[in-house]
Amino acid sequence: MENTKYIKRLEVSLACLLPLIVLVMRLLDGYFRTSISNYAYSEYSYVYVFMLTLGGSMFLYNGTANQKHWYNIVLGISLFGVALTPHKDFTILHYFFAGTFFLGSILAIGLSTSLWLRDWKYLVAGIAFLGLLFHFAFGYFSLLVAESIGLVPFSFHFIVKSLKK
């Protein structure tokens, strides 16, 4: 029988790791790359794949353990797809998985039925959306910055929902 206290702690710990991908990879690689996906071509690509796999596992577990969060199964598989399809070698497939993860996360937050998070969830989804919009539409900053802006609210939202259970 699962001990929900420990499962909740594991989910929160894994959610904290997701936005740290950029910092961990920066420390290992020695510099910031143009996108998170570009770390697939670093000397430490195995750490990049490992961290995305941990994140994907977190989403998969949450989606299977809580049937109301079925969309997390799609988000978890998307993170596995990002890790398994380096963007220079599998461009279309990689961007399909990355787009599914980022846009799916924004939609999952924005369309969440949690009434107690109503105002907050729109703010979080909006921050992630604006980060991507400012990169793709206006070129204000690198894709790495846009991805980082998105990962922080995604993780924070996941943590808040896990602690609320």
Image (cartoon, grey):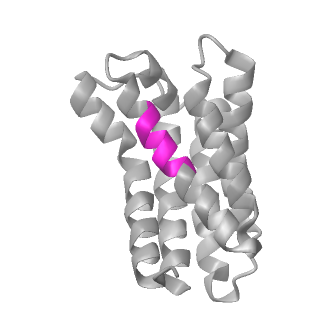
* 148 sits left or right of 47 in the view: right
Residue sitting nearer the eye, 53 or 118: 53
Residue 48 pos. (x, y %): 41, 32
Image quadrant assignment for residue 31: top left
Q: Main secondary structure of the magenta part?
A: helix
Residue 109 visible here: no
* In the rendered image, the vertical position of residue 24 relative to residue 152, given as above or below: above
Part of the protein shown in magenta = 49-56
- At a point 73% along the width and 24% down the height, the residue shown is 93
- The residue drawn where x is 68% and y is 74% is 66
Q: Residue 6: x percent and y percent?
A: 40, 77
Q: Position of residue 7 (x, y in %)?
A: 46, 74
Q: Which residue of the protein is positioned furthest toward the top in this rendering?
A: 89
Q: Is residue 85 left or right of residue 8?
A: right
Splitting the image into 4 quarters, where does residue 64 fall? bottom right
Question: Residue 37's spot in the image, x, y percent?
Answer: 51, 27
Between 33 and 56, which is closer to the camera in this rendering?
Answer: 56
